Amino acid sequence: MTSVCLTRWQRTIGILAALASLAGSASAIAEEHDRPAGGSELSSVVRDATAIQAGKERFSERCAFCHGGAGRGAKGPCLTCGRFRHGGSDASLYANIAGGIPGTQMGAFGTTLSQEEIAHIIAYLRAETERRKAAGELDD
Ligand code: HEC
Protein backbone atom coordinates (compact mmCIF):
# COMPACT_ATOMS: atom_id res chain seq x y z
CA MET A 1 0.00 0.00 0.00
CA THR A 2 2.66 2.53 0.93
CA SER A 3 4.46 2.72 -2.37
CA VAL A 4 1.22 3.23 -4.30
CA CYS A 5 0.06 5.84 -1.83
CA LEU A 6 3.35 7.68 -1.98
CA THR A 7 3.23 7.88 -5.74
CA ARG A 8 -0.32 9.13 -5.68
CA TRP A 9 0.52 11.54 -2.95
CA GLN A 10 3.44 12.96 -4.85
CA ARG A 11 1.21 13.47 -7.83
CA THR A 12 -1.37 15.29 -5.77
CA ILE A 13 1.04 17.74 -4.23
CA GLY A 14 0.75 19.84 -7.37
CA ILE A 15 -3.03 19.70 -7.11
CA LEU A 16 -3.00 20.83 -3.52
CA ALA A 17 -0.69 23.68 -4.38
CA ALA A 18 -3.11 24.77 -7.09
CA LEU A 19 -6.00 24.50 -4.65
CA ALA A 20 -4.23 26.57 -2.06
CA SER A 21 -4.07 29.39 -4.56
CA LEU A 22 -7.73 28.86 -5.44
CA ALA A 23 -8.77 29.10 -1.83
CA GLY A 24 -7.33 32.59 -1.73
CA SER A 25 -9.57 33.69 -4.57
CA ALA A 26 -12.79 32.44 -3.01
CA SER A 27 -14.14 35.95 -2.53
CA ALA A 28 -13.83 36.70 -6.23
CA ILE A 29 -15.89 33.67 -7.12
CA ALA A 30 -19.28 35.32 -6.92
CA GLU A 31 -18.30 37.49 -9.88
CA GLU A 32 -17.45 34.60 -12.13
CA HIS A 33 -20.97 33.57 -13.08
CA ASP A 34 -20.82 34.19 -16.78
CA ARG A 35 -17.41 32.77 -17.42
CA PRO A 36 -17.42 29.93 -19.91
CA ALA A 37 -16.26 26.54 -18.76
CA GLY A 38 -12.66 26.17 -19.65
CA GLY A 39 -9.24 25.01 -18.77
CA SER A 40 -7.15 26.80 -16.23
CA GLU A 41 -4.29 25.95 -13.96
CA LEU A 42 -5.96 23.24 -11.95
CA SER A 43 -7.23 21.28 -14.95
CA SER A 44 -3.78 21.02 -16.43
CA VAL A 45 -2.37 19.88 -13.10
CA VAL A 46 -4.95 17.18 -12.62
CA ARG A 47 -5.19 15.87 -16.16
CA ASP A 48 -3.91 12.56 -15.00
CA ALA A 49 -5.54 9.18 -15.32
CA THR A 50 -5.23 8.19 -11.66
CA ALA A 51 -6.81 11.43 -10.46
CA ILE A 52 -9.60 11.15 -13.02
CA GLN A 53 -10.37 7.56 -12.03
CA ALA A 54 -10.42 8.48 -8.34
CA GLY A 55 -12.74 11.39 -9.14
CA LYS A 56 -15.05 9.13 -11.11
CA GLU A 57 -15.40 6.75 -8.18
CA ARG A 58 -16.02 9.54 -5.71
CA PHE A 59 -18.53 11.15 -8.06
CA SER A 60 -20.47 7.89 -8.35
CA GLU A 61 -20.62 7.56 -4.58
CA ARG A 62 -21.50 11.12 -3.66
CA CYS A 63 -22.91 13.01 -6.64
CA ALA A 64 -24.46 10.71 -9.23
CA PHE A 65 -27.55 10.29 -7.07
CA CYS A 66 -28.53 13.87 -7.98
CA HIS A 67 -26.41 14.64 -11.04
CA GLY A 68 -26.93 11.39 -12.91
CA GLY A 69 -24.54 8.78 -14.26
CA ALA A 70 -21.47 10.46 -15.79
CA GLY A 71 -22.88 13.74 -14.50
CA ARG A 72 -25.40 14.00 -17.32
CA GLY A 73 -28.06 15.49 -15.11
CA ALA A 74 -31.01 14.18 -13.10
CA LYS A 75 -32.61 16.25 -10.37
CA GLY A 76 -29.39 18.25 -10.33
CA PRO A 77 -28.07 19.85 -13.54
CA CYS A 78 -25.74 18.27 -16.08
CA LEU A 79 -22.12 18.72 -15.04
CA THR A 80 -20.58 17.27 -18.20
CA CYS A 81 -22.36 19.38 -20.81
CA GLY A 82 -19.79 22.20 -20.81
CA ARG A 83 -22.17 24.78 -19.34
CA PHE A 84 -22.50 25.92 -15.75
CA ARG A 85 -25.07 28.29 -14.35
CA HIS A 86 -22.91 29.15 -11.35
CA GLY A 87 -19.56 29.45 -13.10
CA GLY A 88 -17.38 26.97 -14.93
CA SER A 89 -13.90 27.95 -13.77
CA ASP A 90 -12.03 25.57 -11.51
CA ALA A 91 -12.38 28.09 -8.69
CA SER A 92 -16.17 28.31 -9.14
CA LEU A 93 -16.57 24.56 -9.33
CA TYR A 94 -14.43 24.13 -6.26
CA ALA A 95 -16.40 26.74 -4.34
CA ASN A 96 -19.78 25.31 -5.35
CA ILE A 97 -18.80 21.77 -4.42
CA ALA A 98 -17.07 22.67 -1.17
CA GLY A 99 -19.51 25.35 -0.05
CA GLY A 100 -22.74 24.24 -1.72
CA ILE A 101 -25.24 26.56 -3.38
CA PRO A 102 -27.36 28.24 -0.72
CA GLY A 103 -31.10 27.88 -1.06
CA THR A 104 -30.87 24.83 -3.32
CA GLN A 105 -30.48 21.10 -2.80
CA MET A 106 -26.80 21.43 -3.62
CA GLY A 107 -25.17 20.87 -0.25
CA ALA A 108 -21.67 21.67 0.95
CA PHE A 109 -19.16 18.85 0.60
CA GLY A 110 -16.18 20.71 1.98
CA THR A 111 -16.34 18.92 5.32
CA THR A 112 -16.90 15.40 4.03
CA LEU A 113 -14.59 15.45 1.00
CA SER A 114 -10.95 16.49 1.14
CA GLN A 115 -9.57 19.20 -1.16
CA GLU A 116 -7.82 16.46 -3.02
CA GLU A 117 -11.04 14.48 -3.52
CA ILE A 118 -12.83 17.58 -4.81
CA ALA A 119 -9.93 18.26 -7.19
CA HIS A 120 -10.22 14.70 -8.46
CA ILE A 121 -13.95 15.12 -9.05
CA ILE A 122 -13.31 18.33 -11.02
CA ALA A 123 -10.66 16.51 -13.05
CA TYR A 124 -13.17 13.76 -13.80
CA LEU A 125 -15.90 16.21 -14.83
CA ARG A 126 -13.46 17.98 -17.18
CA ALA A 127 -12.28 14.72 -18.69
CA GLU A 128 -15.80 13.40 -19.19
CA THR A 129 -16.88 16.70 -20.78
CA GLU A 130 -13.94 16.54 -23.18
CA ARG A 131 -14.70 12.94 -24.01
CA ARG A 132 -18.32 13.82 -24.76
CA LYS A 133 -17.26 16.77 -26.94
CA ALA A 134 -14.85 14.61 -28.87
CA ALA A 135 -17.59 12.00 -29.34
CA GLY A 136 -19.91 14.67 -30.76
CA GLU A 137 -22.38 14.26 -27.91
CA LEU A 138 -22.49 17.98 -27.11
CA ASP A 139 -23.67 20.83 -29.32
CA ASP A 140 -21.72 24.03 -29.15
C1 HEC B 1 -29.12 16.13 -3.06
C2 HEC B 1 -28.82 16.33 -4.45
C3 HEC B 1 -27.41 16.74 -4.84
C4 HEC B 1 -26.22 16.10 -4.56
C5 HEC B 1 -26.00 14.84 -3.74
C6 HEC B 1 -25.19 16.86 -5.24
N1 HEC B 1 -25.73 17.92 -5.91
FE1 HEC B 1 -24.72 19.30 -6.99
N2 HEC B 1 -26.45 20.30 -7.33
C7 HEC B 1 -27.72 19.87 -6.97
C8 HEC B 1 -28.72 20.81 -7.48
C9 HEC B 1 -30.22 20.70 -7.30
C10 HEC B 1 -27.99 21.84 -8.13
C11 HEC B 1 -28.57 23.07 -8.85
C12 HEC B 1 -28.63 24.24 -7.89
C13 HEC B 1 -29.34 25.39 -8.57
O1 HEC B 1 -28.70 26.16 -9.27
O2 HEC B 1 -30.57 25.47 -8.42
C14 HEC B 1 -26.58 21.48 -8.03
C15 HEC B 1 -25.55 22.23 -8.58
C16 HEC B 1 -24.24 21.82 -8.65
C17 HEC B 1 -23.19 22.54 -9.31
C18 HEC B 1 -23.34 23.87 -10.03
C19 HEC B 1 -23.84 23.59 -11.43
C20 HEC B 1 -23.90 24.83 -12.31
O3 HEC B 1 -24.67 24.78 -13.30
O4 HEC B 1 -23.21 25.80 -12.06
C21 HEC B 1 -22.05 21.80 -9.21
C22 HEC B 1 -20.69 22.12 -9.78
C23 HEC B 1 -22.41 20.62 -8.46
N3 HEC B 1 -23.74 20.67 -8.12
C24 HEC B 1 -21.51 19.60 -8.16
C25 HEC B 1 -21.83 18.52 -7.34
C26 HEC B 1 -20.86 17.52 -6.95
C27 HEC B 1 -19.43 17.43 -7.45
C28 HEC B 1 -21.52 16.68 -6.10
C29 HEC B 1 -20.92 15.51 -5.34
C30 HEC B 1 -19.79 15.79 -4.51
C31 HEC B 1 -22.88 17.14 -5.99
N4 HEC B 1 -23.03 18.26 -6.75
C32 HEC B 1 -23.85 16.53 -5.22
C33 HEC B 1 -28.02 18.75 -6.24
C34 HEC B 1 -27.08 17.88 -5.70
Image (tube, rainbow, N blue to C red):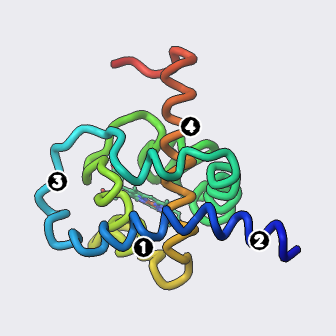
Q: CA distance from mark 2 to mark 4?
A: 25 Å
* Circle number at residue 5: 2
Q: Residue furthest top?
A: 136
Of the pair 66 and 10, the residue shown nearer to us: 10
Task: Indicate the position of residue 56 as horizontal and vertical percent values.
Answer: 66, 52
Which of the marked residues, 3 or 2, is nearer the chain's N terminus? 2
Check disc 3 and report its element: helix, strand or loop: helix
On the image, the x and y values in percent for residue 72 come to 53, 39
Decide which of 51, 9 is in the foreground and name it. 9
- Distance, label 1 to label 2, CA atoms, is 29 Å
Please name which of the two marks, 2 or 4, marks the residue nearer to the observer.
2
SS at mark 1? loop
According to the image, label 1 marks what residue?
107
Q: Secondary structure at mark 2?
A: helix
Amino acid type, mark 1: Gly
The residue labelled by disc 3 is 32
- Give the percent coordinates (x, y) of residue 138: 45, 22
Q: Callout 3: 10 Å neighbours few (<14), some, many (20+)?
A: some
Residue of label 4: 128
Q: Pointers 1 and 2 in contact (CB under 8 A)?
A: no
* Helix, strand or loop at mark 4: helix
Q: Which mark is residue 131?
A: none
Within the image, what quadrant is residue 63 found in?
Answer: bottom right
Residue at x-position 48% and y-position 22%: 133
Task: Tell which circle, 4 or 1, labels the residue nearer the N-terminal end.
Answer: 1
Instruction: Compute the Cα span from label 3 to label 4.
Output: 22 Å
Q: Who comes first in sequence, dot 3 or dot 4?
A: 3
Q: Cβ–Cβ below 8 Å for labels 4 and 1?
A: no
In the image, the residue with mark 1 has its CB under 8 Å from the nearest atom of ligand 1: yes
